[in-house]
Structure formats: C-alpha cells, structure tokens
Image (cartoon, grey):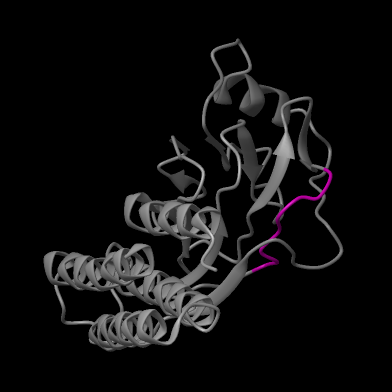
Amino acid sequence: MFSYRSLLTVLGLTVAAVCAKSIDIDVGEEGIKFEPNTTTAAVGDVLNFHFYSATGPHSVVSGSFDSPCAPAANAFFSGLIDGNDAGNTTYIINVTSTDPIYYYCSAKKHCQNGMVGLINPPSTNDTLEAYAKAASSVSAASAPSAPAGGVASTVSGASPTDSSSMDMNMSSSMYMSMSSSMAMSASSTGSAHSSATSAAASKASSAASAASSSASETSKSGAEATAGVKIALGAVLGGMVALMA
C-alpha cells in the first residue's frame, strides 16, 4: 500500500528543489578577493565559486573563526584552481546548514591579505572584518591534503553570472529520481491504481528530461529555465495526486 509518509517526503524534496537559490561568488576576478565576500544562504542553496585567472591560482577552504587561514574539521576544499578569463571554471558547494561558514584562499599570502569570505554572518561580534584582521597576522595559510566536499567543473560557453542551466540539471535529476520513486510505489498498489500512477510517473520523467534538455541550451533565459522547472514540478505533483486517488 502507498505510504503517505513517502508522499510527504517527495513533496518536501520537490518544494526544496524549487525554492533553492543559486549563489554566485567570483574568485579573483578583480584582485585578490571574493566578490561578494559576505552572503546569506539557506539549507539547500548552492554556492557557485567562479575562478578567474588574472590573479590565480586560488582556492576555497572552509575554516573557523577561532583559527583563521586554517581548515575546519571536515572542511570543504577546492584545491588550487587556475581558472580562466571567462570565470566558467567553478567549484560548487551544497549548503547543509545555516551556521556561519568562514572561508579563505590558501594560495600564497592571499588569506593574510584579506581574501576571506563568510556565509551566514552571525549576530555576534565574530564578523568577517574581525576574522580578516586576525588572519593578517597568521604566518602561513594551510589547507587539507586533497580536495573535498564539493564539485569542480568547467562549463563551456556558460555565463559565470547565469547558473540557470546548472540549477535546471540538478532539479531535473531530482525530479527523475522522484518519478522513479512514484513508479516503485505504484508497483505495490492495485492494478488500476498502479496503471494510473505509472502513467503519471512516466509523464513526470518525460517532463524532467525535457527540462534537462532545455537547460543544456545555454541560450535559454532564466525565465525559460524557471518555466521548465515549473512544468516538471507540475508533472511530479500530478503523479502524487494519482497516488492519493
């Protein structure tokens, strides 16, 4: 029998996929700095660090306020990345907590010279300015022994300030996964119910595939990409209604 707990789980994942933000952070585009160096992100949001070659190589390492220019336990680390003029070499992090995340560049003296950033600034005095001031007196920055915690990639032809294609691919992958889950749920129901549900799941999968195909066309506007997500979302929700019937 279909589990309504499963339905709530699928619905939660669907809403999260639509509400998630894609946040772009430029690395070394205009000097030895992150731009913006402070931002707010919710759980489920995606951080896209775009690496530029002018002042590189650079890295992104998560740290803690009390130990500037040093990696935190279980830190994410991009490794040293040269980047390019277009800024389409990226390092992608999924946000899993609303706790403050201090980060820095471990290359040369970049951290000591102010190449630091902060996600979700706290309400305390542990500000980015205070972190940068403490970092200026560190003798040498350090980093994990190997890249960890994120995904590095180069997107050919993509605009560094337009992450709709990446978001669409991520969202459509989630939709395809959810439609597969609906199909599995259908197999445990009656034959008539199963047939209707399987059809809805197939419709959801087709819509997700179409959305993913649209996302791969870099000429698509952000509005068109959003429309694709909504189409896929509608198909998935339609499938869930069929499960409840």
- When the figure is inspected, residue 239 is found, relative to residue 191, above or below; the finding is above
- Inspect this view and state whether residue 240 appears: yes
Where does the N terminus fall, quadrant-wise? Answer: bottom right
On the question of residue 86 being in view, the answer is no
Q: Nearer the viewer, residue 50 or 210?
A: 210
- Relative to residue 119, is residue 121 depicted above or below? above
Q: Which quadrant holds the C terminus?
A: bottom left
Left or right position of 203 against 71 = left
The span shown in magenta is 73-80
Q: Position of residue 197 (x, y in %)?
A: 36, 79
Q: Quadrant of residue 212?
A: bottom left
Q: Is residue 165 shown left or right of residue 80?
A: left
Q: Give whichever of 218, 94 is nearer the camera.
A: 94
- The image position of residue 33, as x and y in percent, is 50, 46
102 lies above or below 77 = above
Q: Residue at x 16, y 78 (%)?
A: 220
Residue 226 location, quadrant = bottom left
Residue 10: percent from the left, percent from the top?
46, 60
Residue nearest the viewer, comparing 3 with 62: 3
Specify the principal SS of the magenta part: loop
Q: Is residue 27 above or below residue 168?
A: above
User: Looking at the image, which is closer to me, 188 or 199?
Assistant: 188
Please state the horizontal and vertical placement of residue 42, each as a whole percent of the image. Answer: 46, 40
239 within the magenta span = no
Q: How many marks?
A: 0
